[in-house]
Amino acid sequence: MINAKARAVDGPDKPFRAAEIKRRDLDSDDVLIEIKYAGICHSDIHTAHGEWGPVNYPLVPGHEIAGIITDVGANVTKYNIGDRVGVGCMVDSCGQCENCRKGEEQYCLKGNIPTYAGVDKYGEPTQGGYSTHIVVQEDFVLRIPDNIELDVAAPLLCAGITTYSPLNHWKVGNSKKVAIVGMGGLGHMAVQIADAMGAEVTVLSQTLKKKEDGIQLGADNYYATNNPETFEKLAGTFDLILNTVSAKIDLNAYLGLLTLDGTLVNVGAPAEPLSLNVMNLIGHRRSFAGSLIGGIRETQEMLDFCAKNDIAPKIEVISADQIDEAYKRVLASDVKYRFVIDTSTM
Ligand code: NAP
Ligand code: ZN
């Protein structure tokens, strides 16, 4: 067993504390990663707070992991000691089902094994990236391009792929009109990626406070959703709306902003159910869809796309002692635009 330092939480209302956790000895296809940076995703907060259902505490969250390989199993072929790598939201899947064979491991019919709050093939609980080390089988490890620093690489492993995948799937190039709802961790990546894909990008944020940043990141337009005129002015405008909001929003108001055949894709995952009036779909043959992270092959494609197009998250690096404070600030929409933990402070 390999000892790792970590930050764990013991219950929905508990603060983070220092912990020692065990990582398994390397199997033949495993690599050992010394984690350098771990991003804080709003999903970590939903999970740590027990909002998505019961959790086995103590919990070590973190699925935006960037680090260096320090050991490899006997049969590892893709990676060497010293390689700069990342790990995202999943660490395993069945590998056999139709979806896994298509490279859509996130939709594994037997369920993918999440990086934390899951149970691995040995029956052990998985623990995430707020930690100094992790052991992962090589097929679920990503290569970080040389021109992306490890601290900014970390958020790409969830915020990057979660926004790249639907923008890619719904083919937003060719000046398609795309709206990004919510400019937090996911939203500010979506703006950059949609812009680089060739879309005409509009941000729909609660207020105009972050307008300058949004325009600088590549948005063509920026509107405040606390102003009812926004919904009148933009009615019937967008081919695609990507909703990244972590809380319940009035879907019907946003569906009204879609064109004929337009699609509203939800990646935001609030605990409360969202409701919609089907008349808002029927009237203009609109669709409402969801999307979960992205497969391993597509995640590598996203990393290479970001490297090529100079796309990077805006981050605030924090120490391990600042996690509780960072959670509070994310909940207050006071993050510009991703907190990243420097694991050397563990
Ligand atoms: P985040 O950094 O907190 O950003 C969420 C943004 O939503 C905020 O910055 C804010 O943007 C807006 N917002 C927050 N509360 C709101 C409210 N009450 N009404 C309207 N807008 C509000 O969170 P994130 O890390 O980007 O994650 C966003 C959501 O995506 C979370 O629910 C997370 O669990 C989910 N997620 C899903 C996947 C997936 O695979 N589908 C993957 C990762 C994360 P403005 O200040 O601009 O209004
Ligand atoms: Zn995430």
Image (spheres, helix red, strand yellow):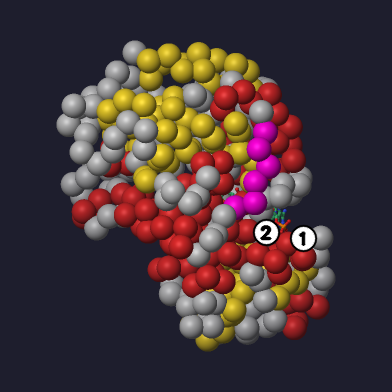
Image quarter for residue 202? bottom right
Q: Which residue lies at the image location 63% right of the left edge and 18% below the top edge?
A: 17
- Mark 1: give few (<14), some (14-19) or many (20+) Cα within 10 Å: some
Give the magenta-colored segment's residue range: 313-318
The stretch drawn in magenta includes residue 106? no
Vertical comparison of 246 with 217: above or below: above
Figure check: 114 above or below 303:
above
Q: Residue at x 54, y 36 (%)?
A: 38
Q: Secondary structure at mark 2?
A: loop
The answer to whether the beta carbon of the residue marked 2 is less than 8 Å from any atom of ligand 1 is yes
Q: Earlier in the sequence, mark 1 or mark 2?
A: 2
Indicate which disc residue 183 carries.
Answer: 2
Residue 210 can be seen, yes or no: yes
Q: Tell me if the residue at label 1 has its CB under 8 Å from ligand 1.
A: yes
Query: Which residue does the image show at 66% across and 38% down from the upper left?
Result: 317
Name the amino acid type tagged 2: Met
Q: From what the image shows, is residue 234 above or below residue 188?
A: below
Q: Quadrant of the C terminus?
A: top right
Dot 2 crowding, Cα within 10 Å, few <14, some 14–19, many 20+:
many
The secondary element bearing badge 1 is classed as loop
Picture coordinates of residue 251 (x, y %)? 63, 66
Q: Are marks 1 and 2 in contact (CB under 8 Å)?
A: yes
- Judge by depth and name the residue closer to the eye, 170 or 297: 297
Between 338 and 9, the one nearer to me in the picture:
338
Residue that mark 1 sits on? 210
From the viewer's perspective, is 173 left or right of 27? right
- The residue positioned 54% from the left and 77% from the top of the image is 199
